Image (cartoon, rainbow, N blue to C red):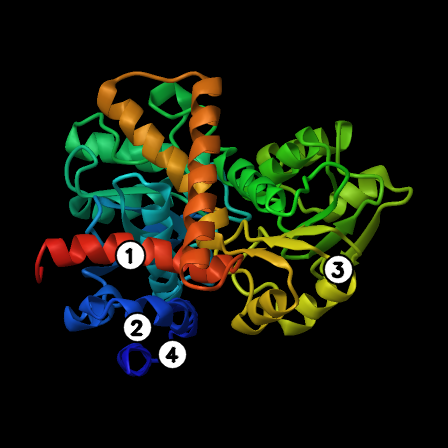
């Protein structure tokens, strides 16, 4: 009934429907055992955002033409702390995408153990192909409206980056916020180290997903060393997933972008990995250039994802629903033993079911990719204390948080008779924490 009401009240928002359905289906065991959640109508309340903000973003391109985009911020749930979640700049962004991301963020943030609520935002602006000055003018216009909804000193809402929003965009957003408010405070995370950012923040999501994978494999007395890994995407998450896998002795053989996939059977390591960083972080080029540059055994598959390549572990790290049922079955047939979601909801519900029914270790994004928001939470703490922790200190805390998330999800899966089902375990562990806070705070 709750799901039907969500579909009725949010027509056409299919990604949001999918995210809600996945969570609600997982919660049946806990709802049966603890009727207080139903008595307090927690489900009806948790699927409804506390606040939905949509606004116009006018800006001027380099040719002097006025362009108009649409901006969003969904402040979904503040039961555990200030709203926390990234901003996505991508032409596919609309209200349903932001709602799905914000809903997922509630449970992801709860799993970290840090005092953060769930939120998300963004725009249908496409930074690809734009000059630095165009991106700056857009970001300044975006912040001209967003700032009024963020509160003071990170007590209300603390955005960060997501697809299309990296260090460049965060810098422009922060600069405009500071100019408007005349306050230098930790209202954004993912900032540069020069002005309050945290070490390990750019690496955190990719590193965290890899740490979570290691914890999963330990339950089978296994490890990442010598594993053949597929990574999709080639942005921030994918890059640092590759780096950490290399450090742990695995071998990554694929990367992709919206135009296609490169397959390098010799591994994306050493000078090849350095080339990817330069290609994507500095030149902002396309992944096919990797194949053109290195040649030899490297193959490029235009308009394809990497899921037909034989592997041990897959790290979907590009975007939502990039693995469908056919892709999932291909991974299973090719011997994949673990799938770790570096992106948000990159597997369809059908694909998820194929993984779990086939005995593949499956780490849902709300657990596996929580490293990014975890270090954002650590950045907030450092900003509040006016100090900076060392790289080793932050990395150690990140490893501890990812181990805690794994333990919480694994233990919940055992407690509710689905041992090793991390989808059920993560959803229940996150839900119980948020629901308890919502009940304790009354009907607000």
The Cα–Cα distance between marks 3 and 1, rounded to whole angstroms, is: 44 Å
Q: Residue at x 26, y 79 (%)?
A: 9
Say which mark, if any, is on residue 432.
1
Q: Residue at x 31, y 58 (%)?
A: 431
For mark 3, what is the residue? 302
Q: Secondary structure at mark 4?
A: loop
The Cα–Cα distance between marks 2 and 3, rounded to whole angstroms, is: 48 Å
Q: Nearer the viewer, residue 350 or 203?
A: 350
For mark 4, what is the residue? 12
Indicate the position of residue 207 as horizontal and vertical percent values: 55, 36
The Cα–Cα distance between marks 3 and 4, rounded to whole angstroms, is: 30 Å
Mark 3 and mark 1 lie on one chain; the one further toward the N terminus is 3
Instruction: Say whether residue 75 is visible.
Output: no
Q: Secondary structure at mark 2?
A: helix
Q: Secondary structure at mark 3?
A: strand
Residue extending farthest to the right is: 296
């Amino acid at each position: 009934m709750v799901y039907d009401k969500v579909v009725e009240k949010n027509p056409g928002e299919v990604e949001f429907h999918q995210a809600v359905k996945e969570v609600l289906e997982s919660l049946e065991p806990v709802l049966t055992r603890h009727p207080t959640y139903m008595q307090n109508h927690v489900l009806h309340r948790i699927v409804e955002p506390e606040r939905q903000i949509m606004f116009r973003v006018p800006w001027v391109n380099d040719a002097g033409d006025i362009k108009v985009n649409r901006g969003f911020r969904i402040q979904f749930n503040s039961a555990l702390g200030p709203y926390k979640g990234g901003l996505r700049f991508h032409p596919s962004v609309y209200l349903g995408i932001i709602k799905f991301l914000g809903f997922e963020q509630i449970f992801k943030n709860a799993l970290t153990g840090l005092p953060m609520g769930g939120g998300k935002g963004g725009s249908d602006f496409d930074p690809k192909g734009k000059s630095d000055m165009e991106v700056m003018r857009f970001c300044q216009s975006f912040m001209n409206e967003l700032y009024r909804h963020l509160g003071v000193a990170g007590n209300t809402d603390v955005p960060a980056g997501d697809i299309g929003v990296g260090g460049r965009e965060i810098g422009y957003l922060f600069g405009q916020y500071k100019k408007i408010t005349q306050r230098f405070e930790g209202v954004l995370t993912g900032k540069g180290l020069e002005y309050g950012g945290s070490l390990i923040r750019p690496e955190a999501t990719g590193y965290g997903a890899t740490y979570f994978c290691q914890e999963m494999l330990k339950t089978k007395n296994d490890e990442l060393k010598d594993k053949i890994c597929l990574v999709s995407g080639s942005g921030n998450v994918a890059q640092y997933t590759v780096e950490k896998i290399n450090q742990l002795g695995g071998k990554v053989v694929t990367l992709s972008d919206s135009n296609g996939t490169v397959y390098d059977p010799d591994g994306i390591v050493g000078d090849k990995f350095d080339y990817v960083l330069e290609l994507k972080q500095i030149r902002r080029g396309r992944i096919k250039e990797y194949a053109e540059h290195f040649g030899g055994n490297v193959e490029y598959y235009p308009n394809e994802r990497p899921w037909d390549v034989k592997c041990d572990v897959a790290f979907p790290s590009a975007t939502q629903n990039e693995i469908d049922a056919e892709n999932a079955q291909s991974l299973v047939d090719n011997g994949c033993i673990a799938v770790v979601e570096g992106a948000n909801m990159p597997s369809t519900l059908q694909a998820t079911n194929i993984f779990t029914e086939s005995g593949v270790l499956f780490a849902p994004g709300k657990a596996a990719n929580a490293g990014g928001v975890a270090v954002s939470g650590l950045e907030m703490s450092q900003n509040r204390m006016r100090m900076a922790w060392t790289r080793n200190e932050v990395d150690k805390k990140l490893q501890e948080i990812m181990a805690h998330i794994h333990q919480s999800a694994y233990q919940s899966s055992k407690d509710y008779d689905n041992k090793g089902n991390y989808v059920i375990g993560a959803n229940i562990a996150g839900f119980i924490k948020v629901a308890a806070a919502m009940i304790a705070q009354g009907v607000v």
